Amino acid sequence: MKLHPSIVPESLRAFFEENPRVLLAFSGGTDSSYLLFAAVASGADVVACTAKGPFQPDFETEDALSFAKALGVRHSIVLVDPLSHPGISANGPDRCYLCKRVLFGKLREIADIEERCLIDATNASDDPSSRPGMRALDELGVVSPLRICEIAKADVRRLSRESDLPFADMPSNSCLATRISTGTAITAEALERVERSEDEIRGLGFSGFRVRDRGDQCILEIQDHDKRVLDNSIAEVESILNKYYSGISYGRRPPSE
């Protein structure tokens, strides 16, 4: 990694000069990892907080812990239990909004106690119309430096490559609750099925895929670059999925940025 201020865009450096004490909602994904790196490279006093609960796969938590440690950043795990909130577990169209209210409400309390600016890694190409959780961020006063500085997902990937960061081409991910159809109640059992099956599928060399839980059925959505992997491992794929589901279908997932 190239930990030097010059590698960070001037507008982002200026943000951290104006906000030298920040608390970052840190998932361990490409955007939040780059933002954590940029904060450290810019000389900010940053605390990274990672949510852990049934919606977050274990591998993301492990990645977040590893990267924060590599940067020497103070890192906290914030335990959340969205399934204890009926409005969230019911999985209505406002699930993401309600979940963000719970998580960022906790982070807001920590940031206020420590007198830090609460930030997240929403970028300039994230569309509010498809991300209802962004309304919760506005309501709780969460600041999005990448969005303010007009840094889009493609920029984040480019800047990450230029900084020799290991996650520049990491596929975009989302919480496990997104694998369950809106309107279908979310259960711990369904989330566990999804996480275990995705962990095993990932071990075959797939990336950027999703296992969509439809009760006793599932849909494996893959991106075009994984078609050959599927062709070469169809028996292994179906052996894995048949442990968790009685029926399997396949779909195409659009490429992530």
Image (spheres, rainbow, N blue to C red):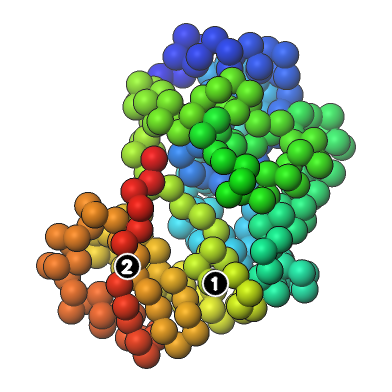
Q: Earlier in the sequence, mark 1 or mark 2?
A: 1
- Indicate the quadrant where residue 142 lies: top right
State the residue position of label 2: 251
- The residue sitting at 49% across, 84% down in the picture is 215
In the displayed image of the protein, which residue is found farthest to the front? 129
Dot 1 crowding, Cα within 10 Å, few <14, some 14–19, many 20+: some
Give amino acid for label 1: Ser
- The residue sitting at 55% across, 33% down in the picture is 123
Question: Regarding mark 1 in the picture, which secondary structure is present there?
Answer: loop
Return the mark for residue 181. 1
- The residue sitting at 14% across, 68% down in the picture is 231
Image check: 131 left or right of 65? right
- Indicate the quadrant where residue 238 lies: bottom left
Question: Regarding mark 2 in the picture, which secondary structure is present there?
Answer: strand
Residue 111 position within the rendered picture, expressed as x and y whole percent measured from the top left: 80, 37
Image check: 241 left or right of 105? left
Compare residues 150 and 164 and report the one nearer the observer. 150
Query: Can you see residue 160?
Result: no
Compare residues 150 and 47 and report the one nearer the observer. 150
Give amino acid for label 2: Gly
Q: CA distance from mark 1 to mark 2?
A: 15 Å
| Figure quadrant of the N terminus | top left
Location of residue 3 with respect to 195 vertically, above or below: above
